Amino acid sequence: MMESAMGTRGGRNPVRVGNLLTAAVPALAERMIEDAIRREWAQTAGPEAARRSRPGALRQGTLQVSVDNSPWLQELTLRSAAIVAALRKRHGSAVIELRFALGSGRDDADVATGSARADTEAPQGRLTVPERRLTVEEARLVDAAAGQVHDLALKSALKRLLTKDLLARGERPAPAASEQP
C-alpha cells in the first residue's frame, strides 16, 4: 500500500508526478508544456532573442510569442523553422507552428484587461520603467480628439495611439498647431 502512495506501480518503476496529473486532468498537459517552454525559452530561441520575446499560450499546436519590437519580429519570423525544430526536439509534436505578434511582454491577463503591472524584477537584465498614467487633463485631450471620430474601431485605435504617444513622451502634451509660435 505504501508503494502506491509513493508513486510506484505495483513495486515497479516510479511514476512522474506530471504524468499522474496529466492522466487525471488531460487539459493540464498543454499548460505544463507552456511552462516548460517559458523556462527553456533562452536555450530554445537564444539569449538575445529571449530578451526581446516571450512565449505565451499554446493552443492546438500553435505557440503565441510576444515580441517587443518590429525588427525582432521580423528576425524571429525568419528563424521560426529553426525554433520550431528546437521545440519539437524538446517537446515532441506539441508545437506545430509559431505565431509572432508585437507585444509588451505583459501577461495575457494584463493585456486582456489593458492593465499594466510594475514588475519587481527586470526580466533578463532589462531596466524597469516606473509606470506613468495620463493626467486627468491629458485623458480629456485624448477623449476630445477621439470624440470627433465616428468609426468605433478607428476611435479606439486613435485613443490608444494618442495615449501611448503621451506616455512615451513622459511630459505634458505638445501645444496645438494654433498655439505654436
Image (tube, rainbow, N blue to C red):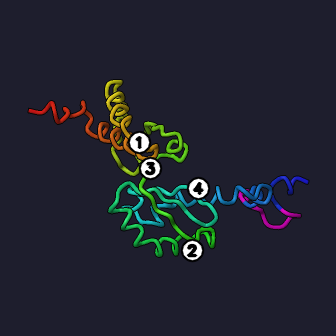
Calculate the distance from the C-alpha at mark 2 to the C-alpha at mark 1: 45 Å
The three-letter amino acid code for the residue at tag 4 is Asp
**First of labels 1, 4 by sequence position:** 4
The residue at which mark 1 appears reads as 155
Calculate the distance from the C-alpha at mark 3 to the C-alpha at mark 1: 25 Å
The residue at which mark 2 appears reads as 89
Tell me the quadrant of the picture where the C terminus can be found.
top left
The residue at which mark 4 appears reads as 35
Calculate the distance from the C-alpha at mark 3 to the C-alpha at mark 4: 15 Å
Which of the numbered marks, if any, corresponds to residue 64? none
Calculate the distance from the C-alpha at mark 1 to the C-alpha at mark 4: 37 Å
157 vs 93, left or right, is left
* Residue occupying the far top of the picture: 136
Q: Are marks 3 and 1 in contact (CB under 8 Å)?
A: no
The residue at which mark 3 appears reads as 105
- Disc 1 packing (10 Å; few <14; some 14–19; many ≥20): some
Q: Residue at x 58, y 71 (%)?
A: 96
Q: In which quarter of the image is residue 145?
A: top left
